[in-house]
Image: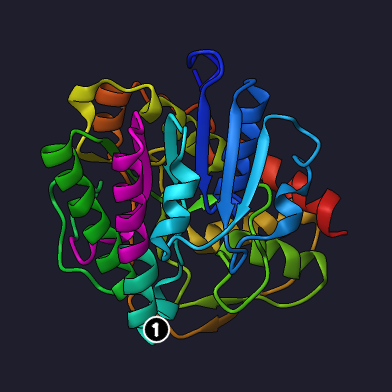
Amino acid sequence: MGYQNVSFPEGSRFLVTGGAGFIGSNLCEAILNMGHKVRCLDDLSTGKQKNVDIFIDDPGYEFIKGDIKDLDTCMEACRDVDYVLNQAAWGSVPRSIEMPLFYCANNIQGTLNMLEAARQNGVKKFVYASSSSVYGDEPVLPKTEGKEGNLLSPYAVSKRADEEWAKQYTMHYGLDTYGLRYFNVFGRRQDPDGAYAAVIPKFIKMLLNGETPTINGDGRQSRDFTYIENVIEANLKACAAPHEAAGEAYNVAYGGREYLIDIYYGLTKALGVDIEPNFGPDRAGDIKHSNADISKAKRLLGYDPDWSFDRGIQAAIEWYKQNLL
């Protein structure tokens, strides 16, 4: 279970792009704890220096401040690297509708720069963040790879384009690429602030401060919320996956389904507060329901997540209590 049984050759070097972000910093931490070297590339546009300051004294850690939109930076970052975990991207469906050109430049061209740099530097495995948003308006649950609908946002388009480019690099250039379609990841170090903050940390922070959160829509939308430990497992197991599994995209989730309104009242109970939410309009580009079929990742990557939503939310609440109060 988990990633404790995943091993890599001694002295392996990993590059984590977006390494100062929520998912990236957790990946850096896990790899350093395994005794391997980590190079973190981040322009700190959405990532935070404080997320990686905890690694500064680790001799296996290196930080490069740079932007994946710059090919020379990507080339430098990939030098002498065995495994690339490409997490650098701008998230948020509604923000992508406001900034389509930026999302194309950052999420598509940036990823393509990283693929090319990894190819030229002889990287063994290229694992990259995709998203459940690629399923668009496909109504059938659970979501299964190969059954995608119409894309509903520039963000979703950018992630689908990344998958297609990665497939080309496996097909034509022999670079083993593995796309991970994240389903609503949550956990320690996820940013609770800002207009586009993820819902769980935002709710927790507001409730801890005695504020009234707003739920977009009626709260009956459902998501396959996925604790960060499961995402770490998927990334590391993809790095250890066989060539036969390359050139594909995989659902990364727990395989469950939680309703937003139930999560809200579960948080108020866990935090000991009695605050009724406000309800606002649905967010543009959002899908109503999300639930993943993770059988492909189990079969081809050996992915076997053992952090349920209930276990993960308790860990997340404790982390935010310690770090926000």
**At x 57% / y 57%, what residue is drawn?**
42
Where residue 12 appears, as percent x and y from the top left, is 51, 22
**At x 56% / y 17%, what residue is drawn?**
4
State which quadrant residue 307 falls in. top right
Where residue 207 appears, as percent x and y from the top left, is 75, 67
Considering the numbered disc 1 on the image, is that residue within a helix, a strand or a loop?
loop
In front: 3, or 243? 243
- Local packing at callout 1 (Cα closer than 10 Å; few below 14, some 14-19, many 20+) is few
Quick check: can you spot residue 145? no
Q: What stretch is highlighted in magenta?
A: 109-138
Is residue 168 placed above or below 324 in the rendered structure? above
**At x 57% / y 65%, what residue is drawn?**
199
Is residue 197 placed above or below 144 in the rendered structure? below
Give the labeled residue for mark 1.
99
Q: What amino acid type is highlighted by mark number 1? A: Met
Q: Is residue 111 magenta?
A: yes
